[in-house]
Image (cartoon, rainbow, N blue to C red):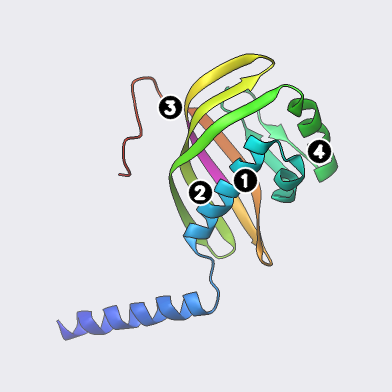
Amino acid sequence: MRAWIGVLAASLACATQASAQGQPDPAAVCAVAEKHYAAIRAGDSSTILQQHMPDHTYFSGDGALLWTFHSIEQQRAGFEEMAQSFISKTHIRHCNAQVYGNTGIATYYLVGSVSVDGKTTTGTWRVTEVWIKQGAEWKEAHHHESPLLAGVTPSSKP
């Protein structure tokens, strides 16, 4: 019993020390994902691009092939073209994140509707994002989304 108390005390001391040393907090990864989707809903491509790594990759929720960008300029051109016909009314639900060093992985459900070229799709998508912390900022390196199967609803965290 005393051994377990010692291990618990040491673990808590290490966690407190890591937090005091500014180790990334998983909640910060979910917060930056929320900020990212607020920019998407607002059509704020400048903020979106500031949150992307230059070589950002993306699997869209429609099952299309991987979108690969080789620079922020290439992303900007793609966003400007897409912005003409893209409207997102989606919200993040049940975000969960893990942090490993300077890498954060966010998983959540994206709920709502997306309109592209006048065609609106409403539903729930499963999302996984990889975020890299550079200095004080998180940058999205990869985004993957896929539709949640029909008849399944994310009612609560597991």
**What is the x, y in percent for residue 36?**
62, 45
Residue carrying label 3 = 148
Task: Kindly identify the residue that appears in the image at 54 percent across and 66 percent down.
Answer: 24
Asked if 87 appears above or below 3 in the picture, the reply is above
Asked if 117 appears above or below 138 in the picture, the reply is above
Q: Which callout, 4 or 1, points at the residue further toward the start of the chain?
A: 1
Q: Are marks 4 and 2 in contact (CB under 8 Å)?
A: no
How far apart, in angstroms, are the residues tagged by discs 1 and 3?
A: 21 Å
Characterize the local packing of mark 4: few (<14), some (14-19) or many (20 or more) Cα atoms within 10 angstroms.
Answer: some
Q: Which callout, 1 or 2, points at the residue further toward the start of the chain?
A: 1
Q: Amino acid at mark 4?
A: Arg
Give the mark toward the camera: 4 or 2. 4
From which residue to which does the magenta span run? 125-129
Q: Amino acid at mark 2?
A: Ala
Task: Kindly identify the residue that appears in the image at 58 percent across and 52 percent down.
Answer: 32
How far apart, in angstroms, are the residues tagged by discs 3 and 2?
A: 17 Å
Residue carrying label 4 = 76
Q: Which mark is residue 106?
A: 2
How far apart, in angstroms, are the residues tagged by discs 4 and 3?
A: 29 Å
Give the mark toward the camera: 4 or 1. 1
Q: Which callout, 3 or 2, points at the residue further toward the start of the chain?
A: 2
Task: Kindly identify the residue that appears in the image at 75 percent across and 40 percent down.
Answer: 45
Q: Amino acid at mark 3?
A: Leu
How far apart, in angstroms, are the residues tagged by discs 4 and 2?
A: 24 Å
